[in-house]
Image (spheres, rainbow, N blue to C red):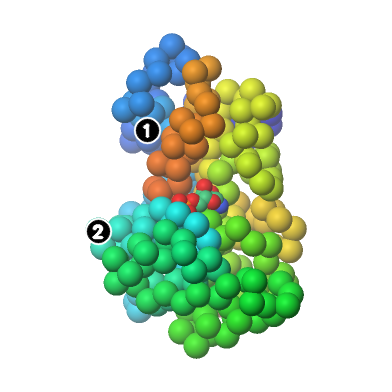
Amino acid sequence: MQLVFSIVNKMNNLDEKEMNLISTASNPRQNSCYEKDEKRSLIWPPPPARPKFNPRLNLGVMASGNGSNFEALVKAIQNSELDAYISILVVNNPNCEARRRAKRLGVPCVVHDHREFSSREELDEALVKTFTNHAVEGVVMAGWMRIVTPILIAAFPNRLLNIHPSLLPSFRGLDAVGQALKARVPISGCSVHLVTPQVDDGPVLAQAAVPVLSSDDHQSLSKRIQRMEHQLLPLSVAIAGQNWRNAGQN
Ligand code: GRF
């Protein structure tokens, strides 16, 4: 509830430029047109003006399933919205769509099938080795459906990001969209945060809020949140990248 108030307060204090980021609809529930969703959404903080990184950010990405967030990162890089490159995608399911996307997009991909490791720690050791071999500066968990251990987290302190389909700290864990629908909240969204040992915890870098319409089912709300995820993730990587580079200067 506090989070909702803080979003509303922020909306009330926005200047004209910032107002362009948010809705003009006074009552989202009265208008269920999909095309208007993005206008009714709020991303916070506002995107930095395409920060340049010299050299470009070298990223590792982890995905388990569909890989639409991975592709959103690739597209943002191709459109010069994110000054980075992805040197390796790691997937844990050999048949996942993310792997096929990597092939189509020309991004190197390696499979670390969790079923072939005797523990979470062993899998994470393999991940650390892969990312270290590629000298990545940061790692993005873009739909990684495994719990990670302190082995991976400690190897990339403040450099391991996760995207989650809720306004954290609400609805951590599995099926965040279902949890939001069950709780009948009027606003949901997505968060990108730094990974800490607690699942879906850790400092939030950026969030996007979307309305939950009375007509929503799991599919429609997931779609609306995912559209915002695809904007939020590249923006959050840019914010994290600025932090990494600033930390390097101290
Ligand atoms: C996203 O909704 C993300 O928030 C969650 O897993 C989903 C991955 O979707 N962690 P995709 O594989 O990127 O399409």
Image x and y of residue 122, in percent: 69, 80
| Classed neighbour count for the residue bearing mark 1: other residues with Cα under 10 Å, few (<14), some (14–19), many (≥20) | some
Q: Secondary structure at mark 1?
A: helix
Write the residue at 68% across / 39% down.
Answer: 170
Image x and y of residue 120, in percent: 71, 72
Marks 2 and 1 in Cβ contact (< 8 Å): no
Q: Look at label 2 and name its amino acid.
A: Asn
Q: Which mark is residue 79?
A: 2
Residue in front for this viewpoint, 86 or 178: 178
| Residue identifier under label 1 | 38
Image x and y of residue 44, in percent: 48, 42
Write the residue at 55% across / 75% down.
Answer: 112
| Classed neighbour count for the residue bearing mark 2: other residues with Cα under 10 Å, few (<14), some (14–19), many (≥20) | few
Q: Quadrant of the C terminus?
A: bottom right
Instruction: Tell whether circle 1 marks a residue whose Cβ is less than 8 angstroms from ligand 1.
Output: no
Q: Which mark is residue 185?
A: none
Q: Look at label 1 and name its amino acid.
A: Glu
The answer to whether residue 58 is seen in the rendering is no
Real-space Cα separation, disc 2 to disc 1, in angstroms:
20 Å
Q: Quadrant of the N terminus?
A: top right
Write the residue at 45% across / 46% down.
Answer: 229
Write the residue at 50% across / 75% down.
Answer: 111
Q: Quadrant of residue 49?
A: bottom left
Residue in front for this viewpoint, 60 or 4: 60
For residue 150, side relative to residue 10 (left or right): right
Mark 2 or mark 1: whose residue is earlier in sequence = 1
236 in relation to 123, above or below: above
